[in-house]
Image: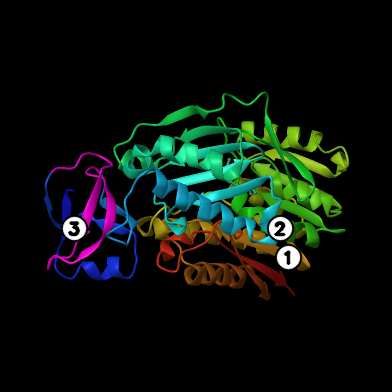
Amino acid sequence: MTELILQSGKERSVMRRHPWIFAGSVAHLKGRARVGDTVDVLADDGRPLGRAAFSPHSQIRARMWTFDSEETIDHAFFKRRIAAAVAARAALPELRDQQGLRLIHGESDGLPGVIADRYGDTVVLQLNSAGAEKWRDALATALVQASGCVRVFERSDSDVRGLEGLEARTGTLHGGEPEGPVVIEEHGVRLEVDIRGGHKTGFYLDQRENRWLARTLAAGRSVLNCFCYTGGFSLQALAGGAASVLSIDSSGPALEGARRNLALNPQLSARRAEWRDADVFEELRALKKAGARFDLIILDPPKFAPSAAHADRAARAYKDINLLGFRLLNPGGLLMSYSCSGGIGIELFQKIVAGAAIDAGADARILRRLSAAPDHPVSLAFPEGEYLKGLLCQAV
Ligand code: SAH
């Protein structure tokens, strides 16, 4: 097999089980390898370190499939990895019966570049690396076997594919198109998931626990849900007995989805819900001007900083919305504030929120630190996997 030889000293990161090999760490390739081929990875003294998928067009030149240099990368390998990931979730009571569940969380499940989300009996598969792309069929087959789902739909249309030199690709991989919209239940609330065109694989499964937390805090409160997408937090707040829920998003299709979701849940009080098609930055200012106040504010913006290079601009955007959020809180009010930017760590995020509170003249404290649900685990060897962080703050 073709050998990828690392620069001297660059074996250390691989020996700590970090799965990425950057272009600058590669000394040379012994033999030929095409896009996505499996290569043996060796230290510069010839020590075998494991096997990786080769990606000649990416700055991440190779991604480790295994740190066992004897392990063969074949259909059986993917079957084992996927069965282990599915079993790990089934072992957690809070995940066991979820209809919407992340089955494979990329690097943290030992499958770099592979995302698989289950919605009922449909798996949505997203392949984000050359290696993952190469094993599409093996992955789809193993997912059906391990999950018991009847179909696999591919949503390989994320921006990162461009960095790997891969074209976007969506469509059915197994079992045909689902009949009609895919609907899941989350904490007893029905939600339509647009697997063909929705964000990510259709839904933000990572916020499942945080939506539950919002529900437990909502009773009797006036709620403002910013960046509401298809209304996940809004509907849970209504289910929790919110007095009112104002939801803002700048995407028409997302708001249409939110309205449809509300209609799917006749048990919820629709007259307490208001949807507003607006830019959050502008609308928060307008609400402040109008003298509005809320008891619970949720800020779950899109990724302002995909990487550390965008951190400065992103920090200003986070500061801005959090500052406005604190200004709109009633005394004793709660702010749930999130960042899903890989380029902003939890320490920096907390500093930004603290700065926002000071500038807003708010005396606030952290009640809880929040993160993604446990079907989005973070491998200790791969801290980059921790992208979603949040704070539940209370103003006094
Ligand atoms: N909280 C949601 C997920 C939010 S995703 C959930 O639990 O499902 C981020 C959302 O922000 C998207 O729906 C996007 O349309 C919206 N968005 C992005 N920029 C915006 C802006 N400036 N103003 C309002 N909405 C925006």
Q: What residue is drawn where x is 17% and y is 48%? A: 2
Q: Nearer the viewer, residue 278 or 391?
A: 391
Is 306 positioned to the left or the right of 236 in the image? left
Disc 2 from disc 3: Cα separation: 44 Å
x and y percentages locating residue 112 in the rendered image: 39, 51
Picture quadrant where residue 255 is located: top right
Decide: marks 2, 1 in contact (CB < 8 A)?
A: yes
Q: Crowding near pointer 3: few (<14 within 10 Å), some, many (20+)?
A: few
Q: Look at the numbered disc 2 and give the secondary structure of its residue.
A: strand
Disc 1 from disc 3: Cα separation: 46 Å
Is 154 positioned to the left or the right of 322 in the image? left
Is 306 positioned to the left or the right of 46 in the image? right
Question: What type is the residue that disc 1 sits on?
Answer: Leu
Q: Please identify the quadrant where the C terminus is shown.
A: bottom right
- The residue where tag 2 is placed is 297
Q: What residue is drawn where x is 49% and y is 49%? A: 82
- The residue where tag 3 is placed is 24
Q: Earlier in the sequence, mark 2 or mark 3?
A: 3
Q: Earlier in the sequence, mark 2 or mark 1?
A: 2
Q: Look at the numbered disc 3 and give the secondary structure of its residue.
A: helix
The residues colored magenta run: 32-57
Question: What type is the residue that disc 3 sits on?
Answer: Gly
